[in-house]
Image (tube, grey):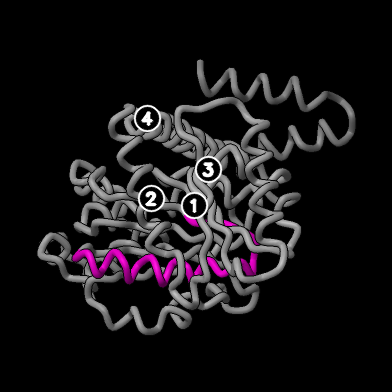
Amino acid sequence: MEFSMKDFWNGNRRALARAITIVEDERDGFEDIMKDIYHHTGRAQVIGITGAPGAGKSTLSDALIKKYRAQGKTVGIVAVDPTSPFSGGAILGDRIRMNDLTLDKGVYIRSMGTRGSLGGLSRKTADAVKLMDAFGLDVIFIETVGVGQSEVDIVKNADTTLVVLVPGLGDDIQAIKAGILEIGDVFVINKCDRDGADRLNVEIEMMLDLGEAQNWRPPIERTIANKDQGVDDVVAALGDHRKYLEESGVLDERRRDRARSEMLEMIHDRISRHIEETISKTGEFSDYVEQVFERKTDPYTVVDSIVGKIFK
């Protein structure tokens, strides 16, 4: 299928899928697509969901999506999966687990494999979210695999970050390690019928007390997502946070910071590519490598010389 912006603006889901693929793979014309759609972004509610593997993020996402659909809202999901080293495809299979949602034309699900990348994935995720936003989806979820640094970077693309914890997995230690408290806007203790839910609740409260006082104190909701218990309270908490962001001006502040980070990353990427294409593949650079290897000069002097020529 050839991509057509007309089909995209007419609400053709296949055109949305095609646009995301073109941008993700950086095929010819991908920047033109992003330029065309940019002025139509910034309207969707973007929610990041992260937490330890096994915490039930996909089950909770599934339950939340159904609540938003019941409100008449359209929903997009960017599911970030680890990539299969064999096929290059995402292996967790969120689209299989969300199989009953795939038939709903008001829901669009896209899996994105990490492909071993970190910074690049964060931008690809942001681009996919922008495309879904411009397409007209009301709520967009970014669901990540775990609570490592890559997940922290990815959910920075969200307006609200939902952290899913579960009793009995040592989540308190994981949360501290990953700096999750800094990015968590709403906490959910899923599978709260398990032993240890009260203890985990107290530990999260204690960790929040240790942090600096903020105008927004993240609520702690309890759910049994596979039984649809407590999910309405999570939707309400997400709505409260959205209202707080808009009324306090924090939403604009976050999006301004995001624009700044995104542009700096793009500038860095362009310069890196320029260096790769015009310098590192030349015989002159190979000579520099030999000189450094033989200790005839040092890398600092060489880099100063190269950078000086580029910005002369």
Badge 1 is on which residue? 162
Q: Are marks 2 and 4 in contact (CB under 8 Å)?
A: no
Q: For the view shown, which residue lies furthest in the front direction? A: 198
Q: Could you tell me which residue is drawn at 65 percent across and 46 percent down?
A: 204
Distance, label 3 to label 4, CA atoms, is 40 Å
**Numbered badge on residue 238:** 2
- Name the amino acid type tagged 4: Val
Alpha carbons under labels 2 and 4: distance apart = 15 Å
State which mark lies toward you, 3 or 4: 4
**Contact (CB < 8 A) between labels 3 and 4?**
no
Along the line of sight, the residue nearer the viewer: 96 or 51: 51
Distance from disc 3 to disc 1, alpha carbons, whole Å, reads 41 Å
| Badge 1 or badge 2: first in the primary sequence | 1
User: Which residue matches tag 4?
Assistant: 250
| CB-based contact (under 8 Å), mark 4 and mark 1 | no
Magenta segment range?
A: 49-72
Q: Pinpoint residue 200: horizontal percent, then vertical percent.
A: 68, 54
